[in-house]
Image (cartoon, rainbow, N blue to C red):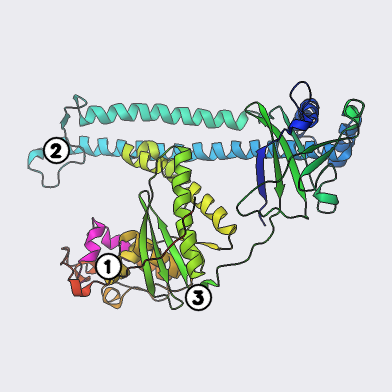
């Protein structure tokens, strides 16, 4: 199970304050954090040296060199090892992102050079003015840039090659450069164990008061133990168990000490039933979230749209996301069913933002996709609702072809219906009216059929609104016909399902 962390500012009871306005625990943390930082830096340097690391021997060395006990040294080693592993992972991720940017930049340069080559070849012809095919790069003049298309493309090509060289030099430097690890000052880390009293022998917390074991080097100044009343960690849904390992982290932030406890959360009462008894599918878009509830047979029962604004500052964005998450929580609790969402990865697309338009780059950069599912998973898991992820392949296409006109759904509602059915392990075969005009191989997976249909529709469908009025799909899937027969949808053919649910108001 994933570990949780509760944080808060370190309380300073009035009865514990000294003439300097600090508690005894704050005085001790200020002294011990300096020793902890030196130990952590030396441990990190040893881990980066490439020598074989023996945890037991290094633990003994830290005890003898700095006058700390074994469990204090365990905290030093755990924090240092985590910082080193994170630095290595970040370096590899940086190199991977640069490699993807190099590939995207090289592909753009290749396409631009091919376009220039074809244009030169076209204008060398005799009587090119009478050509019926035209040129991919016509000689037009831009009033905005005050230059021709050729000059603009050659200018962009020159700077793109410079950018490509810059990326390549960055990758070469990162591969040869040593790993750098930054360990902040003003922190103390103590690892817990489930076999010890209160989950941690060095920091024992009974729910109100914490008792910290002082290392040997500071016993003369602070005694054997330092105690302070830090209180509880108040939460609406408190999953902090009485038993189990508790790892404590004291750190300084904005001029004051904070305390954090990491633990394995206590189980909560399961509210959602099996996914085979129905579920809610959601489809996240930059401006709204479409949702659809399906019954155990996979039939649509209720649907709707939840507006959400993206591109806000982080604080306001979290407030908007939490509001939508609590609305989804209310529906899932009322239906006692899990929520099914799509699992997307935009890392590859974000490496191609320089080759895309500004509008697309701004939309994708301001889309808080990962943050939405991070908050949604945390809110649902604390209240006994399961969150299931599925492959989103062809969900929008299947929803538009099969369910948009059938139920009168918006594109994101239709995609949410497909996602919900996919979470229930229900198949999505092509309609028989379409398979009659496609060369469908029954031995292949059904997604290969949808891929074949998608390739044909890209040449005919240019707007999702056409999915509502297509009365006969023959004109789209038949290779001999290229026109689109888009008729209006009658009111008798439209099925609308309105769903009103009194949801509790969440703050």
Q: Residue at x 59, y 63 (%)?
A: 384
Q: Which of marks 2 and 1 precedes in the sequence? A: 2
Residue 54, percent from left and from top: 84, 40
Label 1, label 3: how far apart the Cα atoms are: 24 Å
Checking the image for residue 125, the label placed there is 2
Give the residue displayed 49% in from the left and 63% down from the top: 339
Image coords of residue 278 (percent x, y): 47, 73
Q: What crowding class fits label 2: few (fewer than 14 Cα within 10 Å), some (14-19), or many (20 or more)?
A: few
Q: Could you tell me residue 16's position as x and y percent?
A: 78, 31
Q: Which residue is mark 1?
A: 408
- Residue 277: mark: 3
Residue 221 x/y as whole percent: 89, 25
Image marks 1 and 2: residues in contact by CB distance under 8 Å: no
- Foreground: 389 or 49? 389
Mark 3: few/some/many CA within 10 Å (<14, 14-19, 20+): some
- Is mark 2 in CB contact (under 8 Å) with mark 3? no
* 3D distance between C-alphas at marks 1 and 2: 53 Å
| 36 sits left or right of 489 in the view | right
What residue span does the magenta drawing correspond to? 453-472
Pair 2/3: label in front: 3
Of residues 379 and 136, the one nearer the viewer is 379
Q: Secondary structure at mark 1?
A: loop
Residue 486's place in the image compared with 24, above or below, is below
* Residue 466 magenta: yes
Determine the secondary structure under disc 3: helix
- Direction from residue 121 to residue 105 in the image, left or right: right
Q: Nearer the viewer, residue 130 or 373?
A: 373
Task: Indicate left or right for 300 with 215 as reference.
Answer: left
């Amino acid at each position: 199970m994933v570990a949780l962390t509760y944080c808060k500012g370190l309380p300073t009871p009035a009865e514990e304050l000294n003439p300097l306005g600090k508690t005894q625990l704050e005085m001790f943390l200020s002294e011990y954090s300096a020793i902890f930082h030196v130990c952590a830096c030396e441990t990190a340097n040893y881990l980066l040296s490439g020598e074989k690391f023996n945890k037991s021997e290094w633990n003994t060395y830290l005890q003898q060199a700095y006058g700390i006990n074994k469990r204090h040294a365990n905290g030093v080693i755990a924090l240092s090892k985590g910082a080193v592993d994170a630095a290595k992972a970040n370096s590899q991720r940086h190199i991977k992102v640069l490699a993807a940017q190099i590939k995207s930049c090289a592909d753009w340069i290749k396409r631009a050079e091919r376009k220039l080559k074809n244009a030169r070849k076209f204008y060398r012809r005799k009587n090119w003015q009478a050509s019926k095919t035209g040129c991919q790069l016509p000689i037009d003049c831009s009033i905005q840039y005050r230059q021709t298309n050729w000059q603009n493309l050659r200018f962009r090509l020159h700077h793109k090659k410079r950018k490509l060289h810059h990326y390549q030099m960055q990758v070469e430097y990162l591969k040869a450069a040593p790993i750098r690890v930054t360990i902040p000052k003003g922190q103390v880390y103590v690892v817990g164990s489930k076999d010890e009293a209160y989950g941690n022998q060095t920091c024992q917390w009974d729910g109100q008061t914490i008792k910290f074991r002082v290392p040997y080097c500071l016993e003369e100044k602070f005694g054997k133990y330092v105690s302070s009343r830090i209180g509880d960690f108040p939460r609406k849904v408190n999953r902090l168990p009485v038993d189990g390992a508790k790892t404590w982290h004291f750190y300084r932030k904005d001029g004051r000490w904070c305390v954090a406890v990491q633990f394995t959360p206590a189980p909560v009462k399961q509210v959602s039933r099996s996914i085979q008894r129905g579920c809610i599918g959601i489809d996240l878009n930059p401006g709204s979230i479409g949702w659809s509830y399906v019954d155990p047979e996979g039939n649509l029962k209720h649907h709707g749209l939840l507006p959400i604004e993206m591109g806000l500052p982080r604080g306001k964005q979290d407030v908007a996301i939490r509001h939508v998450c609590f609305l989804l929580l209310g529906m899932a609790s009322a239906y006692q069913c899990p929520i099914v969402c799509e699992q997307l990865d935009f890392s590859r697309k974000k490496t191609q933002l320089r080759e895309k338009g500004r509008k697309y780059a701004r939309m994708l950069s301001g889309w808080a996709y990962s943050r939405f599912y991070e908050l949604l998973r945390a809110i649902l898991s604390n209240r006994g609702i399961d969150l299931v992820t599925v492959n989103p392949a062809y969900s929008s296409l299947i929803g538009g072809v099969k369910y948009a006109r059938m139920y009168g759904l918006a594109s994101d509602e239709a995609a949410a219906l497909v996602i919900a059915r996919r979470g229930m392990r229900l198949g999505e075969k092509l309609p028989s009216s379409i398979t009659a005009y496609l060369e469908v191989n029954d031995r292949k997976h059904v997604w290969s059929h949808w891929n074949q249909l998608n390739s044909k529709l890209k040449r005919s469908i240019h707007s999702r609104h056409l999915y509502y009025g297509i009365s006969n799909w023959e004109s789209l899937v038949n290779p001999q016909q290229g026109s689109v027969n888009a008729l209006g949808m009658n009111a008798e053919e439209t099925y609308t399902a309105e769903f009103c649910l009194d949801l509790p108001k969440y703050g």
